Image: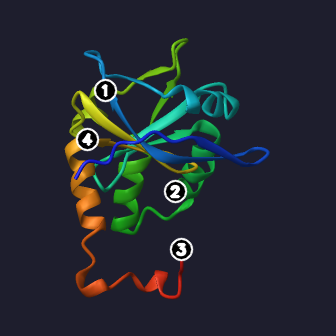
C-alpha cells in the first residue's frame, strides 16, 4: 500500500498553526531534508525557522517549531526523574533533541545519530500531526499504515467509541 499525497498547512487561528498531510521526500547525500515550501512560511513564523527534531518511541523523528517544543520540553523536564519510565522518556525526547534552523533554501540537516535511530535513508515521509511533523523511513511508514488499517473484528480503541467522521 502506497500513500503519496501532498497537503497544506492550515492556520486554524492567528498564532496557531496546524500541520497535516503526508508528503514523500528525499534526503540528499548529506542527510538534508528540504521542507516543502507550503510549510516553510509557517515554520518561519513560529520562531524564525528554528525547529527542534527529536526521537520518538515509534522509531520515527518528531519535528517541532521551536515555539511548540519549548513548553513540551519544560513539562518533560519538570517531571520526576525517579520513575524509570519517565526518566527513559526524558532521555529519549529531551536527550536526543537537536536545535536546527531552516537554511535559505528551506533545508534542515538531520543529525546522523537521529537519521540512524529512525533508519532514514533516501526516501522519507513527512507527516503533519497538528503542531508537529513526524519524519518516517518510507517502508516503516507503509507498515504503520497497514497496522492502522488492520482493526481486528472492526474493533476501535475505547477512546474513539462514539466518535464519528
The nearer-to-camera label among 2 and 1 is 1
The nearer-to-camera label among 1 and 3 is 3
Distance CA(mark 4)–CA(mark 3): 29 Å
Q: Where is mark 4, residue-wise?
A: 137
Pointer 1 or 3: first along the chain:
1
48 sits left or right of 134 in the view: right
Check disc 2: other Cα within 10 Å, few if <14, some if 14-19, many if 20+: some
Q: Residue at x 54, y 25 (%)?
A: 37
147 or 73: nearer the viewer: 147
Distance CA(mark 1)–CA(mark 4): 10 Å
94 or 106: nearer the viewer: 106
Q: Residue at x 39, y 81 (%)?
A: 157
Q: Where is mark 3, residue-wise?
A: 165
Task: Tell me the number on the disc at residue 26.
Answer: 1
The nearer-to-camera label among 2 and 4 is 4
Pointer 2 or 1: first along the chain:
1
- The x, y position of residue 160, in whole percent, is 47, 81
165 or 48: nearer the viewer: 165
The nearer-to-camera label among 1 and 4 is 1
Callouts 4 and 3 close, C-beta under 8 Å: no
Distance CA(mark 3)–CA(mark 2): 33 Å
- The x, y position of residue 139, in whole percent, is 20, 45
Callouts 1 and 3 close, C-beta under 8 Å: no
Q: Where is mark 2, residue-wise?
A: 76
Distance CA(mark 2)–CA(mark 4): 26 Å
Amino acid at each position: 500500500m502506497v500513500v503519496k499525497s501532498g497537503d497544506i498547512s492550515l492556520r486554524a487561528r492567528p498564532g496557531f498553526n496546524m500541520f497535516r498531510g503526508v508528503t514523500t521526500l528525499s534526503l540528499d547525500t548529506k542527510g538534508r531534508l528540504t521542507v516543502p515550501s507550503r510549510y516553510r512560511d509557517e515554520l518561519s513564523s513560529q520562531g524564525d525557522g528554528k525547529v527542534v527534531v527529536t526521537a520518538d518511541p515509534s522509531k520515527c523523528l518528531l519535528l517541532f517549531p521551536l515555539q511548540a517544543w519549548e513548553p513540551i520540553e519544560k513539562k518533560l523536564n519538570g517531571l520526576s526523574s525517579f520513575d524509570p519510565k519517565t526518566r527513559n522518556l526524558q532521555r529519549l525526547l529531551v536527550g536526543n533533541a537537536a536545535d536546527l534552523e531552516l537554511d535559505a533554501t528551506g533545508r534542515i540537516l538531520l543529525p546522523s545519530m537521529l537519521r540512524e535511530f529512525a533508519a532514514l535513508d533516501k526516501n522519507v515521509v513527512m507527516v503533519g500531526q497538528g503542531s508537529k511533523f513526524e519524519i518516517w523511513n518510507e517502508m516503516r511508514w507503509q507498515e504503520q499504515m497497514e497496522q492502522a488499517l488492520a482493526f481486528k473484528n472492526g474493533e476501535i480503541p475505547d477512546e474513539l467509541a462514539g466518535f464519528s467522521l
